[in-house]
Amino acid sequence: MRDIFDAIQRSAKRIKEAIDVKDIGYSQSENSSGETQLQLDIKCDMIIEEEFSSVLSVNTIASEEKEDAMKFRDDAPYYIAYDPLDGSSLIDVNLSVGSIFGIYKGGFDAKNMVASCYVVYGPRVEMVFAENKVKLYLLQAGDFEFVKEIHLGEKGKLNAPGGTQQNWQPYHKEMVDSFFKEGYRLRYSGGMVPDLHQILLKGGGLFSYPGTSDKPDGKLRKLFEVFPFAFIYQKAGGDAIDGANDLLTLKCAHVHDTSPCFFGSKYEISRVKDVYAGK
Ligand code: P6P
């Protein structure tokens, strides 16, 4: 695992340099989700592919920016699914973005997840790496320095409601509003990584990206967005569900499958379960 952790650190430093270069604009291509790719998306994908290609413990990689998984070697144990630059469209308005990594042993399946990691490119570059514990690192003078372990409180005060509100189910809107009536504060930038990072570091709350009338299976991708954050939130003492089920019990038929997702402290997730029971 150390070799994978080191490859992620090398990738993060190179991606940060790529982000700092003047915006190189959109490419002519689309990713598997039909989103026009920034040339920066493609560059960051290549950086991570390059770094993992030389890690002997990596069997296969799957990227949000590629249609299919890419096999490096048969006899290696680890499968890495990653989103190289999540929320990249926020760069041209100077908001934080991130890279997300799911590390699976023996195949791409939630039950095989053994570690996960994300990097936030914001005013500072920070990394969160989870195996048994959830650890925060800060990029300082060219190295990621360990800062602290992260733990979620039983109940938080931040509410990050994703998705197009006009397409929410009525019961979902009622639930979101009920948290605001309890005094929760709205914290939503449209970047999954900084939005979930904030809730983790500020002690808790709820991030939701539900099934909607236009996207009944949600928008966020299981292998390289939903499962990695579910792993981190559960290891930090919170919960992560699709409305009813633990996200890490879900099957994934295709690399780009999506799922409705709720990440948060235990109090907020229990409220989601009550609202979604039987829906
Ligand atoms: P919406 C960014 O495009 C992203 O994939 C996630 O980072 C983010 O949480 C979500 O989409 C935002 O989607 O529909 O709320 O704008």
Image (cartoon, rainbow, N blue to C red):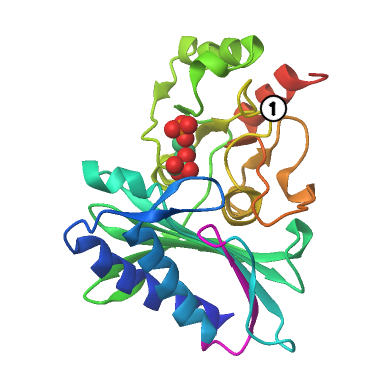
Q: Residue at x 48, y 9 (%)?
A: 181
State the quadrant of the C terminus: top right
Membership of 172 in magenta stretch: no
Q: Quadrant of residue 67?
A: bottom right
Q: Residue 32: where, in percent of width, then height?
A: 56, 52
Placement of 15 over or under 37, stated as above or below: below
Q: Nearer the viewer, residue 81 or 248?
A: 81
Q: Residue at x 30, y 61 (%)?
A: 125
According to the picture, the residue beneath numbered tag 1 turns out to be: 270
Crowding at label 1, few (<14), some or many (≥20) Cα neighbours within 10 Å? some
Q: What kind of element bears circle 1?
A: helix
Residue placed furthest toward the right: 278
Q: Residue at x 20, y 62 (%)?
A: 20
Residue 79 visible to an observer of this rendering:
yes
Residue placed furthest toward the left: 22
State the quadrant of the N terminus: bottom right
Placement of 263 over or under 147, stated as above or below: above
Q: Residue 237: where, in percent of width, then height?
A: 62, 46
Residue 94 visible to an observer of this rendering:
no
Q: Residue at x 44, y 67 (%)?
A: 45
Q: What is the span of residues highlighted in magenta in the rendered image? A: 54-66
Q: Residue 56: where, in percent of width, then height?
A: 60, 90
Q: Amino acid at mark 1?
A: Ser
Q: Residue 99: where, in percent of width, then height?
A: 44, 59
Side (left or right) of 269 relative to 253: left
